[in-house]
Each structure stands twice: as structure tokens, then as C-alpha cells.
Image: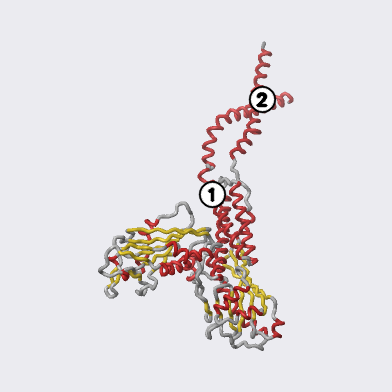
Amino acid sequence: MVCAFNLCVIDQLLRGQLAALSIAVVVIVVGVPLWWKTTETYRAWLPVSQINELSNLQLQLSADVEVVFARGTVTPEQQKKVPLTRTQDEEHSVDEDTALRYRYETRYRTATIMEEDALDQPTAAEADLSLHTLSECPCGSLVVYVIPESSSLLPQDVDVYIGQRRTALLRIGGQIRVGKTLDLLLAHLEPRIKQVLQVMSFSHTDITAALSDRVRLSPGNKESIADSMRTFKSSPGYEITFSLLNPDPKSHRLHWDIEGAVQTYIQPLLTKLASVANFSIDSQTLYYAMLGVNPRFDSSLGAYTLSPDSLAHMINPVEARLGSNAASSNPVLNFLLYVPDAQHSPLHIHDSKKQEVPTNAFHSPRWGGIMVYNVDGFYGPEAVFPVDLNINMAKVMGVFLAQLRLLLGVQSPNAPSGFLVAPCSRTGLADWELDRLMWSRSVENVATATTTITSLAQLLDQIGNIVINDNIAEQVSSAVTSLQLAVAELEAGNLRFALQYSKEAILASERAFFDPSLLHLLYFPDDQKFAIYIPLFLPMCVPILLSLLKIVSDARQKRREKQAKKD
């Protein structure tokens, strides 16, 4: 009986030990891997090495210029010796992570018979138009026609004429006459052609200003800092709002043909800028809308005035009534036409020197512009109110068009002495001005997209709990690919393709960076995970661990007993 009882006890102990071992094996072999797999953070693959390469931005901008010698500038012997091409490189180190390289490739040839006929026009503007009809210069390229000193196309004090297209007329200097050596002629033309390139294509100042989001501008370059702060940041689209403010509808019944004015004055400019961004336009009329500042009456002028210090306080009270397009995330450009009430007319804006501003308007950086339109001169003291008034839209749109150019970054460069730049055409934008804007926007988009992508990569590397979905990885890969293509197209001088790829890069990078699934608060930190899992696993793991310890203790005891018997 005693032996049977001992055998039964031993059998139960063995069963208990086998059960504990089986449970431990199942937990370790099946449970732990299953729990680890089902609770791990999914992180799709990202091209980290390519992103790190983009963080060290090395941009090369290539510009092509064709120099055409007209009759009377070179001798027949010199024509045979004119080199086909010349290439010049300039390197600039902006900071430790950003470097710029400019490559100017110049091609030389003599004018054709049709080009000679076009250069025989009575004026430079007509010659510019005739040359444009012969052949259209590609986007990002320039053609410089070298004309003799005796040419009557340019005034005596003008050496370079820049028209509406991508062509320029350069008069050969008096000190370089026909018969001089070709090397002297090219050495004389080279610095002048470089100045033409900087005016009509891009300059180092413009490109550095476009990198303002990536690098810190030097304090000495105040003009570039002011221009970059005034201009709206690059965006795939813009909303333009024209508002008529009538604070005194009981006295003034205003009529403005805003639709016709937009089609006549604004739409040609926006059509030309279609490759840069998309634009949408709306208009509104606000009644009883006040500026929020009290103008001062100047008895010497017999008019009310607004000082420069008070202009900054005009925007906030009006902006509350302007409304915004909540359905769009694009920047809004506001253009306000304010007609003063009868009690505060006429109203004039003064500058810092207490002189009247000729346009009676001002603009606010990255916001828009306001124009004060006085109507007191259109009716006499015996007029019956309300007075019907038609607004001169040509005068108003001329001011708004100039402000729109500034806010979009279309800025007239400071031409060197001896340069004559043709005034704006009906479209409000010359072809070479569009090229300048496209160069700046392409570089700005590349710099912004690289900053966004590298910041996102650093964030994901530092916080391991953020889930990286396949959609985010696809957007990041798309942004990196578009950036590489944009940089390659800039290097090749294909400006239109470079701008398109840079726009795709900035869109993909922003979609990835602002994806809602990247919010870190959606996932538990490690300490919160332990707080959740310990109450769940501890009651189950304690008996298993104690059973395993018991098994190990019994095995050691048996080993000691066997060793004692042998001894």
C-alpha cells in the first residue's frame, strides 16, 4: 500500500511538472512571439540614405545664352575664328550644408539675313517684336544680339536694351572697333553679357533669398531680406480676393466693374503665371466697413491724412470682416478698395517724409494691399445723396497689378547703368521676368521640400513609436524622386521641368509630413505599455515561474542525492 501511494504521488508530481513545462513552452514559443508580432509598431521602409544625401544640398543652375553678332561688329576673318561655345562656372558656399554652382554656357554665331532685316527696324521695341516672330527662345535661355556702335536702335546713353521677350540688344563699345582682335572683342563683351544674364535670368542674390527657409541670410543683405519677407511663400495655389469697402452707403452708391477689370488687367498676368501656380479670384462689397483708425485733418491741405504709423492698424479691424475661404488651404491675397465717407473726404496717405503717396495706396507683406479712392471731387455740395458713382477701374487695377507683382515675387531688378528695360506689356509680365520667377520658385521649392523631408526623417528616427504606413512611405519616396529629378533638371537648364518636379516634391513632402497617422499621441509610450500589460500577464506568469523554479529545485535535489549515494 505504501509503495502504491508513493508511486501515485510521484506520478502526480511528474504530471504537474510536465504540465508546467508544457505551458511554459507554449508561452515562450507561441505566446511571446505572437504578442510581439501583434503589438509591434509597423514602420514601412524609407529611403534614408537618399534623404541624407539631399540634406547636403548641392545645387547647380545652368543658363544658356546665345550671342549673335550683327553686321558690322566682326570682320569676315573674325567670323571664322569665333568659338562655338564657351562655358563659365561659379561656385558659392552658402553654409556648411548648402552650396551653389552657376554654369553659363555661351554659344556664338552671326546673324542670319532675316535677323539682319529685323534689326533694321526703326525702334528697339519693333526690333524685339520682329526677332521674336522669327524664333521663340526656350524657357530659361537668352539671346543677345550684338549691334554696332553706329546703330540707331538705342539712344546714345544706352548700351543694352531689354525688351519683353528673352532677347536683348547690346551695342558694342566705342573702344572696341572693327579690326581689333577677337580676343579683345570677347573680353569686352563677357562682363556685359554676364550683367544681362543677372538681370534677365538669375543672380546670386535672388537665389540666396530663395533659400531663406534653409539658410540664414546675412544681415548686410537688407534688400534681399526685405524682398523675401514681402513675397508670399511658394504655394501650388493662391486665392485672390478683391473687396470694395463702402463705409457710407447712404451717401455713396458705388458701381465697379470688377469682373471686366479682372479679365482685362489681372487675368493676362495670371494666365502667364499658370505654370507657377493656380489662381482663383473672387470679389465682394462690404458696407459700413471702417478702417479702424481716425485720420487727422490737415488744415494746410484741407484734407484728412493717414501717417505711416497708422497704416499698420488698419488691417486687423477690416480683416475680421473679410472672411476666408475655409475650403482651401492656399494663401489669400487681399486687395481692398476703400472709399472714404463724406465726412472724412478727401483722405490721403502720407509717407515717412510727410509727402502724399502718388497712388494713395500701400501694401502689407504677405497679406495684400489697400487703396484709398477719393470720390469727393465727382460731385458738388448741392448733390442729392446717395450719389451714383462709377469707379475708374483702370486706375485701381494699375495699382493692384503692381502690388500683385510684388507680392508674388515679380520684382524689377536694379539694372546697371547703360541698361534700358522696356515697360510692362499688357500681360503685366515679360518673358524674362517669368523666367526669373521660375528660377527662384524652383530653388525655393527644392529647399523647402528637402527641409521638410529631412525633418520628417529625423522625427521618425527619434520616435520609434510612430507608425509609418505604406502611404507615407510612398509619399516620401515620391518626394525624394521628384527632388532628384528637379535637381537634375536645374543642372541641365530645363527650367520648366525643374519647376514642375519641384512642385511635385513639395506637395508630396507636405502630404507625408502632415499625415494624421503620424501623431505620436495616438500611440502609448513604453511606461504606459507596462502599466497595461503587467496586470494582464503577471497573474499568469507567476504560477508558471514558481513551477519552473520548483522543477529546477527538485532536479538539483535529485542530483545531490545521486551524488551522495555514489560517494
Mark 2, secondary structure of its residue: helix
Name the mark on residue 18: 2
Mark 1 sits on what residue? Answer: 515
Locate residue 304, reporting x and y percent.
30, 69
How many residues crowd mark 2 within 10 Å: few (<14), some (14–19), many (20+)?
Answer: few
Residue 306 higher or lower than 22, as above or below = below
Front residue of 14/82: it is 82
Residues at marks 1 and 2, CA–CA distance in whole angstroms: 52 Å
Place of residue 533 in the rendered image (x, y in percent of width and height, measured from the top left):
54, 35
Give the residue at the far right of this rendering. 566
Residue 266 higher or lower than 476, as above or below: below
**How far from the left and from the top, in percent, is residue 346?**
31, 69
Q: Amino acid at mark 2?
A: Leu
Q: Earlier in the sequence, mark 1 or mark 2?
A: 2
Residue drawn 41% across the image and 63% down it: 257
Within the image, what quadrant is residue 251 found in? bottom left
- Tag 1: residue type? Asp
Q: Are marks 1 and 2 in contact (CB under 8 Å)?
A: no
Number of callouts in the render?
A: 2
In the image, 329 versus 281, the foreground residue is: 281
Which residue is located at x 54 percent, y 42 percent?
526
Instruction: Return the x and y of residue 99 as percentages of the image width and height.
Output: 60, 66
> Which residue is farthest left?
382
Which residue is depicted at the point 35% across and 70% down?
349
Which numbered circle lies on residue 418?
Answer: none
Q: Name the residue furthest top.
A: 1
Judged left or right of residue 563, residue 125 is: left
Considering the numbered disc 1 on the image, is that residue within a helix, a strand or a loop?
loop
Q: Between tags 1 and 2, which lies in front? A: 1
